[in-house]
Image (cartoon, helix red, strand yellow):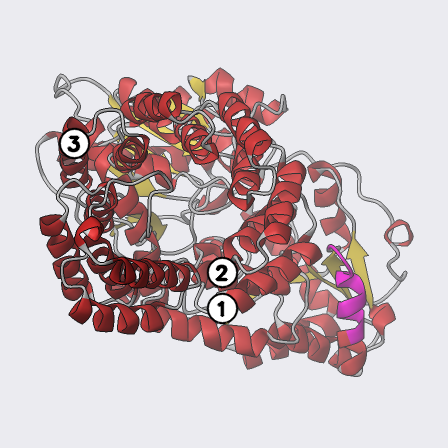
Amino acid sequence: MAMTTGFPGGSADGKSTMPANARAELEALLNRLAHLLRQGASQEAEALAARARRHFPLASELVRLHGVALLQLGRRPDGLSALNRAAELAPDSIEVQCNLANVALEDGRPEAAIERLRATLARTPGHPAVLQVLGVALMVAARHEEARETFTQALRAAPQHPGLRLNLAEVELELGDAAQALVHVREALTLAPRLDAAHALLGHALQAQGHSAEAASAWLEAERLAPREPRHAFQAARMLEASDRPAEAAEAYARALQLAPHSGAALSRLAVLRRRLADWREQASLTTRLREAIETGQPGIVPFALPLEPFDRALQRKAMETFTRTIEHHLAPLRQQLAFTLPRPAPDAPIRVGLLSDSFGDHPTGRAVSGLVEALAALGGLELHLFATNIDDGSPIRQRLSAAAPLHAVDALPPPQVAERIHAQGVEVLFDLTGYGAHTNADILALRPAPVQVNWLAYPGTAGAPWIDYILADTAVLPPSHREGYSEKVLSLPRCFLPLEGCAMAPPPTRGECSLPATGTVFACFNATATIGPEVFARFMQILREVPGSMLWLRTGPDGVEQRLRAQAAGLEVSPDRLVFLPELSHADYLARYALVDLCLDTLPCGARNTAIDALSAGCLLLTCTGDTFAGRMAASLLHHAHLPELVADDPDAFVATAVRLGRDRPALATIRAELAELRTRSPLFDIAGFAMDFRRVVQTIGTRHRIGRPPIDLAF
């Protein structure tokens, strides 16, 4: 809670009726209390205020500061009692009324705060402090245009107040005008060049314009000015990560975590980055801390950390529901304000379905759905709309998608406007293809632009969100026995939930061109480095030790990943030279490398999805191990529906044994590879037209249920 407003107040403590020595004593007490509260010494401040109130029971400012100290200590009833008493003693006190309004905001009652502040303004028209807190309350209530007007009015009364310019910048960011936000921030910096909050908001404005490196510099400057503020280090880390500087980002997350040990966001992002960097020095400790944080309901843990950790479905669901609860609470006022409703369509009207993604282009998701979108367009029976939150990359995939269905480019719009565009198209069933990554659609979907919303190809597990009604899966990736791990209703396809379509491949290179030996078994794992934890890597090294002359082909990684993995190999008695790293390539050139791979090895607890699709599409064998979560069963689903169950191991020991047996038996590998090539002509896994028919049936079923007023239920097709 703010102790003061930062503006001249209107308190009346009756000091003029006190003797001079008493006035001086009270003034010294108030100054001491204010200093303690600014330093965060709430316990000492509360004890001092409690003692002082016995001598000055009618000093409203003393009572107010006591209330602030009590609230900071979590003693809410006592704190409110003190603030209400201060209001009785000094009903015209600006600080008291602003404090009570802030309490209402913290309680999730922005309208009550607005009502109180408007009443205060009626007594003190145009007071900038009241206008400032009123603007904040209007922002919390998602009344952003009114907030802009209120802050502007306050700024006219206090033109030299940098905080008001920062408030205006925040409003402009909410309204989607990052350029104007930047103007206000730079004005604030002119007034207060050493104000850390101004540099922090400069970072936000630059981030909104896509300038990640400059945003990182702004937050690092804010951290330099206020080194004890963990949010500055955390936000700097996020932008360093977005600028592809993961090692620096990890250091910044570690600084933020040291300052705020209970920050779920800093903890989980650090854990992910350390895995991405193959820096396993503290991995066990980070995993333990993450588990404890989830079990205690600590907020802020990012979803993409969960599949990488050895957490069961119940723990993952708990973490997801905790994460989405914050988003739901934040966006509830705006959702209520927008109150999207669709008129009932004509009974024979085709159901309008939308696909929302940040990957409509040359991206694994774009490649996965392009054939499906074309097949759906040819099939008819649905009105399909695509909503792209990523910029147009001009790729052939983007061109195919836009030719097959209306593609709405919404990358430049803030989430509320994207939601309005989706609603304006009358979308009845909306599929989220993004999940909770760097460009999450959660702030769009939480506004409920469509009455039926589905998690598919997005987060590999339960969304844990009240705004997601269904998850599209199959019984291999999500068997009935796993049902309790999911908040959504389950839609089970009769085929693999992942659509496959053949991709163009470049001519294969030679082994020599790829730094591979002329002979020997080539194992590969082109999954992201973050999925290759120490346990997985140890299994890989065991396989290499037991298959003489074999090699392991991995993706290259950032900031010393290759050196760290080679050092780990040496520590496990495997020559570092037996690790080869694949550089970044075009998709066609990357696919061509699978011709040189004898057997791809999957990872756990987070397994392959896109790389599994790539391997099988390129005709390469993949060995997986059935995991216990959605993220660990995706490759198993692909292989199950490809009729290759012999490539799905039951446990890690069986995985190693199978890899060793096949690695030593090249004829056996050739036999299974020939079987895969033959299956491509008759397996339902590669039947995109059949997938489109099943997909249409799913949409028509859940869309019709909504039209006739039936709630979502589990459905098997």
Residue in front for this viewpoint, 304 or 63: 63
Q: Is residue 167 above or below residue 629?
A: above
Q: CA distance from mark 1 to mark 3?
A: 39 Å
Occupied quadrant, residue 377: top left
Residue neighbourhood size for the residue with mark 3, other residues' Cα within 10 Å, grouped as few (<14), some (14–19), many (≥20): some
Disc tally is 3
Question: Which residues are the magenta region?
Answer: 558-567
| Secondary structure at numbered mark 1 | loop
- Give the residue type that dot 1 points to: Glu
Residue 383's tag is none
According to the picture, the residue beneath numbered tag 1 turns out to be 309
Residue on which disc 3 sits = 704
User: Which kind of residue does numbered mark 2 sit on?
Assistant: Ala
Q: Which residue is mark 2?
A: 305
Which one is closest to the eye, mark 1 or mark 3? 1
C-alpha span from label 2 to label 3? 36 Å
User: Mark 1 packing: few (<14 Cα in 10 Å), some, or many (20+)?
Assistant: many
Nearer to us in this view, 558 or 44? 44
Q: Residue at x 16, y 31 (%)?
A: 704
Point out the tag, 2 or 3, that comes first from the N-terminus: 2
* x and y, in percent, of residue 471 in the image: 31, 48
Q: Quadrant of residue 279?
A: bottom right
Compared across the picture, whether 633 is left or right of 68 comes to right
Q: Are marks 2 and 1 in contact (CB under 8 Å)?
A: yes
Give above or below for 449 relative to 673.
above
Position of residue 610 in the picture relative to residue 543 (left or right): left
From the viewer's perspective, tell me whether residue 308 is left or right of residue 570: left
Residue type at mark 3 is: Thr
Viewer-nearest of discs 2 and 3: 2
In the picture shown, does residue 397 fall above or below 24?
Answer: above
